[in-house]
Image (tube, rainbow, N blue to C red):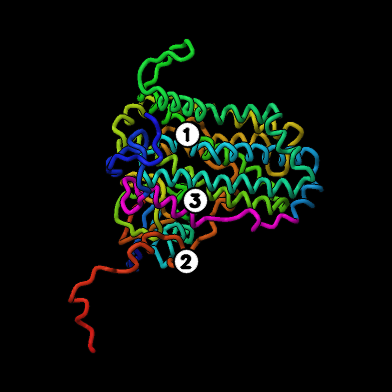
Amino acid sequence: MAYSTFNKVKNDALKEPMFFGQNVNVARYDQQRHAIFEKLIEKQLSFFWRPEEVDLSSDRKDFMAMAEHERHIFLSNLKYQTLLDSVQGRSPNVAFLPVVSLPELETWLETWSFSETVHSRSYTHIIRNVVDDPSIIFDDIVENQEIVKRAESVTRYYDLFIHMCSQYSLLGEGTHQVNGEEVVVSLSALKRQLYLTIASVNVLEAVRFYVSFACSFAFAERAIMEGNAKVIKLIARDEALHLAGTQHMLNLMANGQDDPDMVAIAESCKDEVIEIFREAAEQEREWAKYLFKDGSMIGLNAEILSDYVDYITNVRLRGLGFDEIFDIRSNPLPWMNAWLVSDNVQVAPQEAEISSYLVGAIDSNMDDADFDDFDL
Amino acid sequence: MLVPQSMSSTVTINDMQVFSYGEEFSLLDSMEEHQIPVTYNCRGGYCGSCKVQLTSGKVNWVQDSLVSLEADEILVCCCVPDGSISLTI
């Protein structure tokens, strides 16, 4: 099933599944099978921001005054965030674009990935500001064993899915001999891997990122590194949207509102998805130990952060209709809420991104009766 | 669409607490006004933290919800009561 950049077959995108249908041809948005992705695009565009808008001048001073173990926490957290967004800035495009079949979802994937590249650029903005030689930080992301371990766990599902898709594209379904080895390519195995990959992306954005946000905001709670927290606040706003996107994809598949094959596949993946969440939570707790290995900071230590890992994992599992797997019910970091509130609160409707207010604002359906009140 | 609210909407929480909805922008604001503990994050309809169950009555949406919702679920940051309602939180 070779990819075509403009599928010549005239198809009705309203009848296509999200993935593994026909390749998208005309990028049209006047009709949508899943209108939610168009709404996510609108929202993401309304969120557009540039890293340079945030002034970080006082952060350098704060960083210089920090204790050594606090610098370790701050920089390690920043390295992890850089890793996560390096992955997310390209992977949704590389993995999912070749197999997407709906124009609105295709554009959501690109819009989503693009916003992650803004995040990556903002880390450079932050790192440039706090250290003299950014290479020391960036190089460590591929050299430090703790970070490399994180990279392996966040990319595993993506990489296998991309590998399987390239075999499917090159060889098609069936049993093949490649370099003397037997390779079995099946669409149902691909769809299963797709579901698991999206679940692992949901974990990345909905659990892993939030653990890192907690560290960033903990500094700002003490009125230090506040510029950094402002940037992370903007990133967190975007990530909330992205995780809504992956939750929708998973729920549409599982509820039978998309590809009918996916209902049984999603059902058969349930235990594995819960394991992906459990494993990620375990890794995040390990990471918390590494962060605080030389000492805690005021307001945050490995234990509280681990409780937050459990709490946020439960919240995200509930979002997908799964049962909670950890005992914790209340948020151990209640102050996080203040940092996760978006800025567009209680604005006038015409100033907010309320699509229902904008769409249909002009009534173009006219008939003679509309002129009854007119006198010339 | 923005629809004028009835002034006499009452909101019942978990069959226990009852309060009157005023002129607040959203149900979330109204609940905060009446000191009802409710989880929220984004207040913009996309994080899903303020998802609750609407057990009776109708609501009008003042903001688009961007999260997956079951038929009986609402986001309190995105809607206001249309008449009296009951919620399970």
Q: What stretch is highlighted in magenta?
A: A28-57
Q: Name the residue under label 2.
A: A351
Q: Sort mark 3 into few (<14), some (14-19) or many (20+) by Cα contacts within 10 Å.
A: many
Circle 1: residue type: Ala
Query: Left or right: where does residue B89 sit relative to residue A212?
Result: left
Please name whichever residue, B55 or A30, is drawn nearer the observer in this view of the structure: A30
Q: A139 or B68, which is in the foreground? A: A139
Whether tag 1 and tag 3 are in contact, CB under 8 A, the answer is no
Q: What element carries label 2?
A: loop
Residue B75's x, y, as percent? 41, 51
Real-space Cα distance between discs 1 and 3?
33 Å
Residue under label 3, please give it. B40
Examine the structure image and report whether residue A32 is included in the region drawn in magenta: yes
- Label 1 close to label 2 by CB (< 8 Å): no
Residue that carries the numbered disc 1 in the rendered image: A95
Measured as percent of width and height from the top left, residue B6 is found at 32, 67
Instruction: Tell me which label, 1 or 2, sits earlier in the chain.
Output: 1
User: Compared to A171, does A342 lie above or below?
Assistant: below
**Residue A78: x %, y % from top left:** 67, 41
Residue A159 located left or right of residue B52 = right
**Which chain is disc 1 placed on?**
A
Identify which residue is drawn at 54% across, 50% down.
Answer: A237
